[in-house]
């Protein structure tokens, strides 16, 4: 359900409620005064009271003191990203992409969270635009890709005697943005040629590669324009760094790699090649696994939204950069797997690293739907420029509902869990259950 439909339904509801007398007028921290109406409803045998206000076509819940509840989430910087989205909306309008502009404006205007008793609040549903350059979606997708990729690397580690090496392969900067797309094409072609070089074939067992573009700082003469490059995680045999490997030529040193990359790139200059090994990183609250650390590095997003959403950037320049990125990245596959990594990605259904929903971006995001949940909905309030609580209810677990599909859903969940696939979110579950119900009704309500 899109935020608009949601709001429309809510508005109808408010019209129905408008027979209620106005309880009081409150002033809020947002410098707007609202009329509130008391709304009593019964759920779980408890009479709950919400104060509903209707402000600029949006429903808002306030406390009895008239306090507006804004979204606070230490796990994600929603508000800041939404503000950047509004900037992207403006830039896309001015750059002549009205459709993209609307999508940026409407991205994540509706967020639904679920909190189990005594547990942590987690995102349950949201309307993400999924555009590659969207500041809201960039952050979510980067986390999701890193998580999926770390699973792939874990599986490769479990199945093979492997070591991972991290490579960054670069080319000269592209000064004129209109050649950026062509440069990305050259990079991927060069990568394909690189893989076919005999020493590479001999030493490399698998790879993950991702294209990234950064923007030069423009301060030095050399650092002008765009800097397209490839991040690679290479899988090599465990004995790759051994003395024997160094003797036999299985081990490829820095200067070898530069020459191979130069050959593949078909250039007359020596391109820069950066090599590092992946190590477990010490993190607050424990040690981050080597594969997750590598994945985070490798699955970095193709561009940084700071490159075009920066208050210090003159607007015409920002528009130009946005246009260059949009055109260069359009319909381009930016990531690829090979060898051991490809096999593992296939097994985990993770080949499409960029795809999938952006609601559940890592393991911590899985919501148990078989317990009682407090559901809270936040809508982006364009007037206030913040996420404001717009709905709150208790969701009763399926097992406590009459004639529930608990058994069916439990079985489905178990199947998915066994196959190692991603668990669907709450909405997908309810859609699935609705489908089962309608099939059952179609059969004349017979037990099935
Ligand atoms: Zn988005």
Image: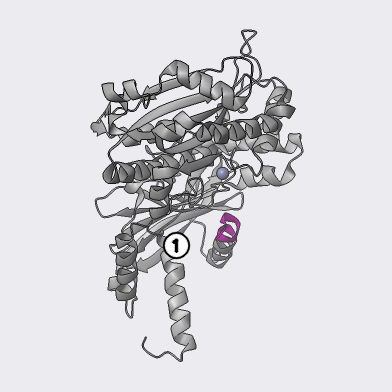
Compared to residue 37, the image places residue 121 above or below, namely: above
Residue 312 on the magenta segment: no
**Location of residue 247 (image quadrant):** top left
Can residue 298 be seen by looking at this rendering?
A: no
Q: Residue at x 59, y 44 (%)?
A: 131
Residue shown at 42% from the left, 89% from the top:
445
Q: Is residue 12 left or right of residue 443?
A: right
Residue 154 rendering spot, x and y as whole percentages: 31, 43
* Residue at (74% x, 28% y) in the render: 178
Q: Residue furthest front?
A: 248
Image-based side of 315 in relation to 265, left or right? right
Location of mark 1 (residue): 427
Which secondary structure lies at badge 1? helix
Q: Main secondary structure of the magenta part?
A: helix
Callout 1: few (<14), some (14-19), or many (20+) C-alpha neighbours within 10 Å? few
Q: How many marks?
A: 1
Compare residues 271 and 222 and report the one nearer the observer.
Answer: 271
Residue 371 % position (x, y): 28, 62
Q: Which residues are magenta?
A: 1-7
User: Which residue occupies the extreme right position in the image?
Assistant: 96
Q: Front-most of 389 and 88? A: 88
What residue lies at 43% left-to-right and 84% top-to-bottom?
Answer: 440
Residue toward you, 46 or 345 = 345
Residue 38 sits above or below residue 315 on the image: below
Indicate whether 242 appears above or below 373.
above
Toward which corner of the image does residue 382 lie, by quadrant? top right
Label 1 lies in ligand 1 vicinity (Cβ under 8 Å): no
Q: Is residue 446 visible?
A: yes
- In x, y percent, where is residue 369? 33, 62
């Amino acid at each position: 359900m899109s935020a608009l439909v949601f709001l429309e339904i809510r508005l109808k509801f408010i019209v129905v409620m408008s027979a209620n007398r106005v309880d009081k007028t409150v002033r809020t921290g947002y410098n707007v005064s609202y009329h509130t109406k008391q709304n009593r409803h019964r759920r779980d045998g408890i009479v709950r009271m919400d104060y509903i206000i209707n402000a600029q076509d949006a429903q808002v819940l306030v406390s009895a003191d008239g306090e507006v509840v804004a979204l606070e989430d230490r796990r994600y910087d929603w508000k800041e990203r939404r503000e950047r989205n509004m900037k992207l909306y403006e830039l896309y309008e001015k750059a002549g992409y009205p459709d993209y502009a609307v999508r940026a404006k409407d991205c994540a205007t509706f967020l639904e969270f679920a909190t189990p008793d005594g547990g942590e609040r987690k995102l349950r549903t949201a309307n993400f635009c999924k555009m590659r350059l969207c500041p809201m979606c960039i952050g979510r997708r980067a986390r999701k890709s890193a998580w999926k990729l770390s699973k792939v690397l874990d599986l490769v580690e479990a199945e093979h005697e492997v070591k991972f090496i991290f490579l960054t392969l670069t080319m000269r900067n592209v000064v004129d943005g209109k050649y950026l797309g062509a440069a990305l094409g050259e990079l991927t072609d060069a990568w394909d040629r690189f893989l076919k070089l005999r020493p590479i074939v001999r030493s490399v067992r698998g790879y993950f590669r991702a294209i990234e573009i950064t923007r030069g700082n423009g301060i030095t003469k050399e650092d002008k324009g765009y800097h397209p490059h490839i991040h690679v995680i290479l899988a090599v045999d465990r004995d790759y760094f051994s003395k024997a490997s160094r003797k036999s030529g299985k081990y490829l040193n820095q200067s070898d790699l530069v020459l191979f990359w130069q050959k593949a790139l078909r250039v007359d200059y020596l391109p820069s090649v950066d090599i590092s090994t992946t190590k477990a990183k010490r993190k607050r609250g424990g040690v981050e696994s080597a594969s997750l650390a590598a994945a985070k590095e490798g699955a970095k997003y193709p561009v940084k939204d700071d490159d075009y959403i920066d208050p210090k950037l003159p607007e015409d320049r920002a528009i130009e950069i946005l246009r260059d990125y949009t055109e260069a990245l359009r319909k381009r596959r930016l990531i690829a797997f090979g060898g051991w990594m490809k096999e593992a990605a296939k097994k985990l259904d993770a080949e499409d690293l960029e795809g999938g929903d952006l609601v559940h971006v890592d393991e911590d995001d899985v919501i148990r739907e078989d317990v009682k949940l407090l559901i809270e909905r936040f809508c982006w309030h364009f007037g206030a420029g913040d996420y404001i609580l717009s709905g709150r209810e208790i969701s009763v677990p399926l097992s406590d509902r009459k004639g529930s599909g608990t058994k069916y859903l439990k079985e489905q969940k178990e199947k998915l869990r066994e196959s190692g696939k991603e668990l669907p979110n709450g909405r997908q579950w309810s859609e699935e259950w609705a489908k089962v119900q309608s099939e059952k009704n179609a059969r004349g309500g017979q037990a099935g």
